[in-house]
Amino acid sequence: MSSQRKLDQFFIKKKLIQSTEIVTTTIEKDESNSGCSESLLSGKRSNEIENDNVPIKRTRIGSEQEEVSNDTMDMSQIINSYKPLNEFYLEKFLIILTSVQKHHRQLFNETELELFTKLELLPASSQIIFIRLLMRRCKWIRLSGIKYERSSSDDPTVNYLTPLVENNLLSDSTSFNNLEDGLNLLTSNEMKEFSKRFHCSSKTKSKKSSIENLKNLTNQYKSLFSNGDTQSTNRDHLLLKELSDSVRKLKRVIGQCYKVSEDVRAIFFRMMLAHHPCALLSMDELDQNAFTLLFKSLQITRGDLRLPWRDEDVNHDYSPFKTTEQLKRYQEAIDLEIEFMRLEESKNVNALLDFYDENKLEMKKTISAQMESDRQLLSYYRRFSSEYVHTRILAHITENLQRARRYDECVELLKFLLDQTVYGCSGRGKLWNRLALIEENYIKDIQKCLDTIGRAINDPFVKLGDRLSLCDRARKLLVKPKIKYSLSWTNEQLLVVSSPKEIQVTGRLLANDSLQRKVTFVIHDPKDGSNQFCSVEQLAIHHYQTQEGFIYEGSVIRTLIDILFLDIIFTIPLPHLLIDLLQTEPLDFDSNDFYTNRQNEIDQRLNDMKSEEAIQEIADKNWISYNGTMTCAVSWDLFQIKENLLNALKCLQPAQIQLLARYLFEYNRSARKGFPDLFVWNPNTKKCKFAEVKSPKDRLSFHQLVWLDTLDKFGLSCECLKLQLELLVTVAKTF
């Protein structure tokens, strides 16, 4: 019986199960006599039902398979089919593992496939603990930190860990030989006691500073840890021995510890990449997202999330990975990007520069070597290559090089990235702008800067705001006196936009003290006569409160337009556009090919939207069909009531909707930046307005200027709301 059907039957009989304590007790007794402790079903059923769990089919008891009858599911079978959250994750994980071995077996060597088999043959208890450890940060963890609901005094967690160690899925204390890892396992109090032994206690009393002091101590006093042997190169290991001795005196506080090795984690990460290549890339934290995908599967099973397609719609024949080596290179590139992201989060500039110095040659080498062969791939398939990831890393590093004033290296790297048009083409405009800025302001070579601008405005990938920024820089350079230059382009190629209409609004600024960083305003509420504190956006909304509706998100217009095309967006015209069940859009959605692949359908829909009635009918139909479906095309939370959405659409003329839709589809990703903050509409008068809100010291970005100019050309009312400050000084209370 399918998991979904069992889920439905469970909820039908849930109340009856909870009220029948005798039946529950009987089943618990039967299970305790069956010797199935390995199946992790020895806990109280009443507690399981109270937990946030879902029913799934039991996959393994040891090496045996238990099947549930499709037709004769009585009360006890329903309870038996109901498993806690950990076992739901296990079920989904094993489904992924089975699917990978069926559809992507060629991407793994024999050793890796044997490792998959070993995991499948382990008891469910060990499988669950392995999955939980696998989805955590890859670091050493004490046994006391591995506590899951199935561990008990009679059947301790260590019994579930031993099979994992024996099958090389986990590393235990015997492989523990790194000083810093050992120090990090200590608590703050343990670290303090250990530091006293070597007379290097930190004045700040922080664990991090104590670790740094001990590491510095090993460098300064080699003989202390090498017993006079100045040739010793293993001081960390000797200090770790001292650490172990000290820990034993501290009542063996570290004890046993375990870790999923880097190699094992990499194998299972490649498994997840092969099965969910698209869903993994959409996550914020790449090293934590596999667990997130399992939780997303739980939400889908419950009905909390809705997929736009079915499992049978996915085409496994068009995997972006063709060989084991290709998948491995991609996984290693993702790991490298994770390391880079962590360094950026730490804001350690020196570490970022060291990272670049260590990896730049290898990344450039792989990009140059693979460029021509990847040119044959479709643009949206190239992002699954290691070279694409390396290009993305290097593009981010250009900013770090500029901040570190390593301008020559930054220029060399920018030119390397711009000399190729295979990877990261959507970010070329930003790179051209950075190169022009450095050549003008730091290298002080105006002719080079103008030549760079000339090449940039002839680059077909440089559009809208990025193009306007370059053109604005060129105009300013050309009017400078006493500058000799030659141009490879004409002034007619420069993009020009009109200045937006500006509205001045006075706001009462609240100034408490010099430490206040966020600007706060005071507004007067005419209803009760009170004064209220607000942000700059809320002040703008207060200015427009005579309107019936307002919202201040740039995604609102994307929602209004895309909901009219959702049925087209979710239609897969080519089989290779759907390779992952958890995709929220077709593969080409973020590319220029999206409009090309559906031009006939989109143009026909545009022709159909010639009247308000037709637009309302299409929106109503798509709302009913797709409301709540997982997608980044529509933000369902913006219009939680269908009538609000339909009222907002009424305030846009059919011709304006057609123009906006065509513009968004043709420019696609380039048009997603700079949309005005506010969209205000009045369903009674059927009028709307777009407004960009700026505080006194802010100025419009080039992307915002392009959008305001475009909206004005489409006949839509738009303006820039400029705030004038009226200072309201308050005295902070002191105690």
Image (tube, grey):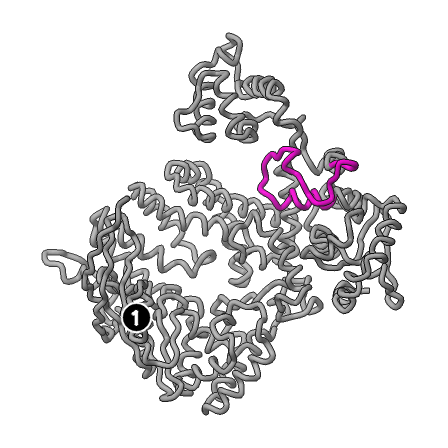
The C terminus sits in image quarter = top left
User: Could you say where residue 563 lies in the image, as x and y percent from the top left?
Assistant: 51, 77
Query: Does 338 sit left or right of 490 as displayed?
Result: right
Q: Is residue 172 magenta?
A: no
Q: Residue at x 29, y 42 (%)?
A: 405
* Image quadrant in which you'd find residue 49: bottom right
Residue 167, can we see it? no
| Residue range highlighted in magenta | 127-156
Vertical placement of residue 406 versus 435, above or below: above
Density class for disc 1 (Cα within 10 Å; few <14, some 14-19, many ≥20) is many
Q: Residue at x 62, y 43 (%)?
A: 266
Residue 249, can we see it? yes
User: Could you say where residue 313 lies in the image, as x and y percent from the top left?
Assistant: 68, 69
User: Could you say where residue 452 lies in the image, as x and y percent from the top left?
Assistant: 29, 56
Vertical placement of residue 381 versus 638, above or below: above
Q: Amino acid at mark 1?
A: Ala
Q: Which residue is mark 1?
A: 540
Query: Does 224 sit left or right of 548 as displayed?
Result: right
User: Could you say where residue 638 lies in the image, as x and y percent from the top left?
Assistant: 47, 72
In-front residue for pair 50/562: 50
Seen from this angle, which residue lies furthest front? 735
* Image quadrant in which you'd find residue 292: bottom right
The N terminus sits in image quarter = bottom right
Q: Residue at x 40, y 69 (%)?
A: 553
Vertical placement of residue 511 versus 583, above or below: above
